[in-house]
């Protein structure tokens, strides 16, 4: 394969409940620092949630922030940070050859809920409804806000793919580069979920909303005492380029995207299907031209729900039954479930393993559920393994959407992590 058909990551911008840059995020993953805390949620009182604390006005005026959305502000912050991280001279870029592809769960709910609340405080006066409502809630809104902010005239759209959104956004960016539709892609996933009331009420109704007196211990994937999802927000946007273009500008490279797959369970609205998850992972591995024993690390989706964790554990156990050397970790114990941003954020947190040879641990798994036991599971303490060359990142979502993404280290061009 020539370098024009190889897609690499040259920049990462992120905000998570426990960090606003990759170095900060990575340090907190290694040190088991949680970003989950108690927050007041409208109508529901104190709930555990992961909120981001980034500067909304670093790249956006207060006027445009008021007109836009929380999801848009996250997207704008992450996209600008990714471009800066990639060392791109933005003024010299042909903006018509840049695409924006963002995976999402939902967006616009924050502002919509606020408008409904204000109407109910004022005798249901519909004149209080914002004239900005429509552009805030159309499906392409977060990606569109990025194009307005950065003067991008190439294609943009969001990909509604539930909690698989982060992986799906990246995969779409890869595909558009391979098709020659763009020369540079800003791709990833974003979520504003923890800013809304509705998602808390819905998970509570399902009996799947996490709770704990100590909020930092509320998200407990694979633990026998897990009791649900800690809802979080966040975002991670990647600069993706063809390897040939990255070489031309002597870009530092985080890794090469060598395999991916998306499939559907077609069995249930919310309960996952282990067989389809296995098929998804194996399809990604086959596309990458690898065997299961070539995968050094699997990052599990691992939401902290009973059915979800057990089904995915069964899938990983089955998919990697022929490998004795593959390590496994998860991320949601640190940050909760960042919904559409989850896959992109969790991949970012693991990419520094290519440089430092350390696998960050899953957090809060102090009493492992026997049904979730796996060989080489890294929990509670980071593990120095010395050499990580390939990472498989799982992200699954409601309505049975599954995604798997495989990244490979490029030794001679590997990204230095500072």
Image (cartoon, rainbow, N blue to C red):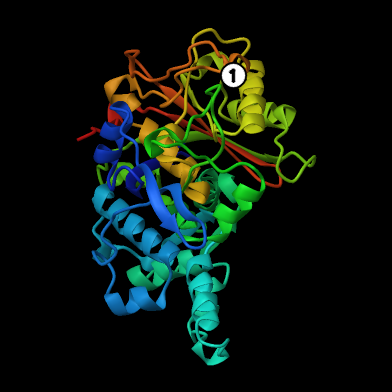
With 28 as the anchor, is 348 left or right in this view?
right
Q: Position of residue 237 (x, y in %)?
A: 40, 51
**Front one among 337 and 228:** 228
Give the class, few, some or many, for how many residues have Cα within 10 Å of label 1's Cα (few <14, many ≥20): many
Residue 237 visible to an observer of this rendering:
no
Question: Residue lying farthest top?
Answer: 324
Note whether 199 is above or below 63 in the view shown.
above
Which residue does the image show at 52% across and 62% down from the upper left?
43
Q: Where is residue 265 in the image (x, y as percent from the top left)?
A: 74, 39
**Front one among 314 and 245:** 314
Picture quadrant of residue 323 = top right
Q: How many labels does the image show?
A: 1
With 355 as the anchor, is 306 left or right in this view?
right
Q: Give the residue pinned by disc 1.
A: 372
Which residue does the image show at 32% across and 59% down from the upper left?
77
- Mark 1 lies on a secondary structure that is helix
With 350 as the anchor, is 377 left or right in this view?
right
- Picture quarter with the C terminus: top left
Q: Where is residue 252 in the image (x, y as percent from the top left)?
A: 27, 39
Question: Residue lying farthest left?
Answer: 418
Residue 51 visible to an observer of this rendering:
yes
Which residue does the image show at 46% across and 49% down from the upper left?
47
With 199 as the anchor, is 307 left or right in this view?
right
Q: Where is residue 293 in the image (x, y as percent from the top left)?
A: 54, 13
**Front one among 12 and 73:** 73
Picture quadrant of residue 355 = top left
């Amino acid at each position: 394969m020539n370098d024009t058909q190889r897609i690499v990551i040259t920049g990462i911008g992120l905000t998570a409940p426990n960090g606003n840059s990759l170095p900060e995020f990575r340090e907190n993953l290694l040190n088991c620092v949680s970003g989950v805390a108690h927050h007041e949620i409208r109508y529901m009182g104190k709930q555990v949630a992961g909120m981001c604390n980034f500067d909304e006005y670093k790249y956006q005026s207060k006027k445009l922030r008021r007109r836009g959305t929380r999801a848009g502000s996250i997207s704008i912050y992450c996209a600008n940070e990714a471009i800066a991280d990639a060392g791109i001279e933005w003024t010299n870029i042909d903006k018509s050859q840049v695409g924006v592809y963002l995976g999402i769960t939902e967006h616009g709910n924050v502002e919509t809920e606020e408008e409904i609340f204000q109407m109910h405080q004022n005798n249901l006066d519909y004149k209080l409804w914002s004239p900005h409502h429509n552009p805030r809630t159309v499906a392409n809104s977060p990606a569109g806000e990025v194009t307005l902010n950065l003067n991008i005239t190439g294609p943009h759209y969001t990909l509604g793919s539930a909690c698989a959104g982060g992986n799906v956004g990246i995969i779409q960016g890869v595909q558009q580069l391979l098709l020659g539709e763009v020369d540079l892609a800003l791709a990833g996933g974003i979520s504003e979920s923890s800013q809304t009331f509705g998602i808390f009420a819905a998970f509570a109704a399902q009996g799947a909303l996490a709770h704990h007196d100590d909020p930092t211990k509320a998200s407990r994937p694979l633990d026998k005492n897990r009791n649900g999802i800690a809802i979080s927000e966040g975002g991670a946007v990647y600069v993706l380029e063809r390897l040939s273009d990255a070489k031309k500008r002597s870009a530092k490279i985080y890794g090469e995207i060598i395999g991916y797959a998306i499939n559907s369970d077609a069995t249930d609205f919310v309960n996952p299907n282990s067989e389809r998850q296995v098929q998804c992972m194996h399809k990604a591995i086959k596309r990458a031209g690898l065997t299961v024993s070539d995968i050094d690390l699997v990052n599990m989706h691992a939401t902290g729900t009973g059915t979800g964790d057990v089904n995915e554990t069964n899938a990983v156990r089955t998919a990697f039954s022929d490998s004795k050397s593959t390590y496994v970790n998860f991320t949601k114990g640190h940050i909760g479930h960042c919904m559409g941003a989850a896959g992109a954020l969790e991949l970012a947190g693991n990419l520094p393993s290519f440089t430092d040879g350390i696998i960050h641990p899953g957090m809060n798994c102090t009493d492992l559920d026997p049904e979730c036991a796996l060989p080489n599971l890294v929990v509670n303490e980071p593990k120095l393994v010395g050499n990580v060359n390939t990472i498989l990142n799982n992200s699954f979502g409601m309505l049975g959407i599954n995604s798997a993404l495989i990244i490979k280290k490029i030794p001679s061009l590997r990204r230095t992590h500072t």
